[in-house]
Amino acid sequence: MNCDIADKNLAPQGKLRIEWAERQMPTLRLVRERFAQEKPLDGLTVACCLHVTTETANLARALAAGGAEVHLCASNPLSTQDDTAASLVEDYGINVYAIHGEDNETYYAHVRACLDAAPDVTMDDGADLVSTLHKEYQCLLDKLHGSTEETTTGVIRLKAMAADGALGLPVIAVNDAMTKHFFDNRYGTGQSTIDGILRATNTLIAGSTFVVAGYGWCGHGVAARAAGQGANVIVTEVDPVRGLEAAMDGFRVMPMAEAAPLGDIFVTVTGNRDVITLEHFKAMKDGAVVANAGHFDVELQIDALRDYAAERREMRPSLVEYRLPEGRSVFVLGEGRLVNLAAAEGHPAKVMDLSFCGQALSAEYLVQHGAELENQVYTLPEELDRGIAALKLESMGLTVDVLTEAQRRYLASWEEGTR
């Protein structure tokens, strides 16, 4: 077994936390139990570039139960839980290459370590693994059944590759599954982003002006939770339909240039770059707090802010003050990286239960059907998506109605209408 982790002695603490997360992931446990019996991944190697958290640990356990040799690296240098990484190595036999706070060189060395294992299936969160695969490990493409992608940012990159004819394997966009973006992006990102802001700042959200950049499913969740805490929410958008939706949901809508002088707290959730620029930072009021929950730190022009600032001080863990030459200060959380993972623990296990079922079942699907797929980005098949939802309802002790035969015929017919 191969690994590069911070401290193996942290394993006992990590194991307890993994077990706690498992209690809140009953749907994934059902998948793991079936995998243990059927071994759909037997003899295969799965390389995963995901956030190394307790929830991901339970996904890795499910893949291993299915017969896979699992290699895991971090998809964000600040999201790794070192005790979780230690337990995965010591207690569950997973090959882990991840250290909290690792530098950029180490980060990519860990990505390459996963690819050095010559995987049959890859899993990604942000497409760094697939990007490196195409740049440096093209010899592996013919061996791979395919890949999966967890997040909006990664799907954007992969669709761009497919449009350019550069994508060399089929990819299932787990992020686009109904059981992922309806729930993980909205409820998970909404709660965990607020959690990260509160842990880093201990500020009062009620009565503040809270600016949300981007009104996709993640933006929906952040805006709703901020409003629920009593904030006055402003939404900035580039899509007029989403801007209209935000207005209909009761939020003020305006460009970032207009919002910058008004906001007390800013959160970017766009998956794009330069959402908050140096000019926006310059326009902010003294004491403004800025965070990113979109994925990569490029959403904020941190380098430009660092160069412009007269002084930089770490006030609290994950909270850095940038004092501007004008005398005002802005505060950036988690170095501009994912605030819910840099300053907190990421999404609650109950919502990751759905997302990681999608990942596990997508890996199984690629092994069974990858040879039939073109080198394009696919959505998780609807029957699998609805099956995950049914399993989740079952784990919650809930059921839904079943269509009668007459109802099925009516929905399938064009002949029946108004009587």
Image (spheres, rainbow, N blue to C red):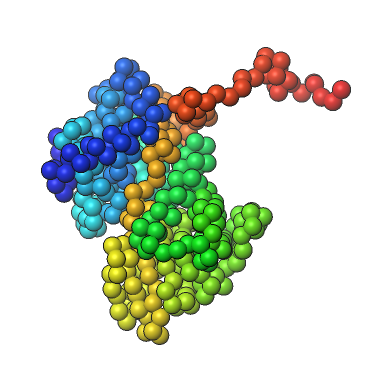
- Residue 349, compared with residue 78, is above or below; it is above
- Residue 156, compared with residue 238, is above or below; it is above
Name the outermost residue toward the bottom: 326
- Residue 245: x and y in percent read 64, 53
Q: Is residue 174 visible?
A: yes
| Residue in the picture at 22% in, 37% down | 15
Q: Nearer the viewer, residue 35 or 105?
A: 35
- Residue 11, compared with residue 404, is above or below; it is below
| Residue in the picture at 49% in, 36% down | 179
Q: Is residue 233 left or right of residue 300?
A: right
Q: Is residue 178 left or right of residue 13?
A: right
- Residue 8: x and y in percent read 13, 43
Res. 335 image quadrant: bottom left
Q: Nearer the viewer, residue 133 or 87?
A: 87
- Residue 406: x and y in percent read 71, 15
Q: Is residue 178 left or right of residue 128?
A: right
- Residue 397, compared with residue 91, is above or below; it is above
Name the outermost residue toward the right: 419
| Residue in the picture at 40% in, 32% down | 357
Q: Is residue 284 left or right of residue 82?
A: right
